[in-house]
Image (cartoon, helix red, strand yellow):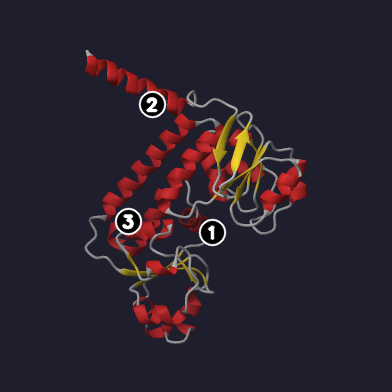
Amino acid sequence: MKRSFWLLLLALSFALLTSGLAQPFPRTLTDDLGRSVTLKAAPQRIVAMLPSVTETVCALNACGRLVGVDDYSDFPEQVKRLPKVGGLYNPSLEAILALKPDLVIVSVYGRLHEGLERAGVASFAVKPETYDDIFRTTRLLGRVLGLEAQAERLVAQIQREVYTVETRAAKAKERPTVYYEIDPTPYTVGPESFIGVLITKARGQNIIPKELGLFPQISPELVVQKNPQVIVLTHPGAADLPKRAGWAGVAAIRSQRICAFTGQQDNLLSRPGPRVAQGLQLLVGCFHPELRR
């Protein structure tokens, strides 16, 4: 009898937490800038300033609450019709205010939150950079929107999808060394970034030392020294790689194991959001052509 009672109590407690009844509005949450943000009610007019946030809000079935998005948000299809209000480093405060939002979800980078604060508009800052951040941010947005149960279901869905792809990748016979380039500066990804974790899950070995950080700018000589077997690019510069000093002898270039992902494929890889399993699938196909569907 006691065991049944405690099981029932635990089930009720979980239901209260995930339904949002445990903390009704108004509620005060801490954003990724460390600020305490008080929301008087679940926001209904939202401007999202990160593509991954836009996709997450829509995956929580709250796309209808979006009244504006950043210049790069283009998924799902319906957000293409929304007003665009600038990018990370060139947001248009005037355009945002014209939409009369009750909340603007911003990046921790840039200073948009300061202008919004002066204008009396609430903002909430997020910083999705690691693999775990994908799920933490999803849950955090669920609390912001008053959609905790939906957020838990979305987290479970993403994890199932990733597990399915990761299980297939585990059949690979090799683990090639990999260099992943975001742009020709060159900026790359560290192993503890969300892309770095995807590389590992896809049965690749990132050549970048974790001590360099999540998204470091590196010396091109490091790539020559590490001699990766596979190169992944998210910019259209594959033809120029052999022209870089010393790069013609890099194993990936000699064997032409170069995967260039641009456009929508780049979006799948570069956005820490609900479609991360599709990005993982791209990497698996790149590293292990025999496992391509």
Looking at the rendered structure, the kind of residue marked 1 is: Gly
Locate residue 214, reporting x and y percent: 45, 63
- The residue carrying mark 1 is 263
Locate residue 57, reporting x and y percent: 55, 39
Locate residue 121, reporting x and y percent: 71, 40
- The residue carrying mark 3 is 201
Counting residues from the N terminus, which is met first, the one under dot 3 or under dot 2?
2
Image vertical order of residue 260 relative to residue 7, above or below: below
For marks 1 and 2, give the one nearer the viewer.
Answer: 2
For marks 3 and 2, give the one nearer the viewer.
Answer: 2
Query: Image point 42% across, 86% down: which residue?
Result: 246
Locate residue 109, reporting x and y percent: 60, 56
Query: Image point 32% across, 56% down: which residue?
Result: 201
Name the one closer to the observer, 31 or 62. 31
Counting residues from the N terminus, which is met first, the one under dot 3 or under dot 1?
3
Q: Which mark is residue 14?
A: 2
Counting residues from the N terminus, which is met first, the one under dot 1 or under dot 2?
2
Query: Image point 54% across, 59% down: which residue?
Result: 263
Image vertical order of residue 20 relative to residue 67, above or below: above
Which type of secondary structure does the marked residue at label 1 adopt? loop
Which type of secondary structure does the marked residue at label 2 adopt? helix
Which type of secondary structure does the marked residue at label 3 adopt? helix
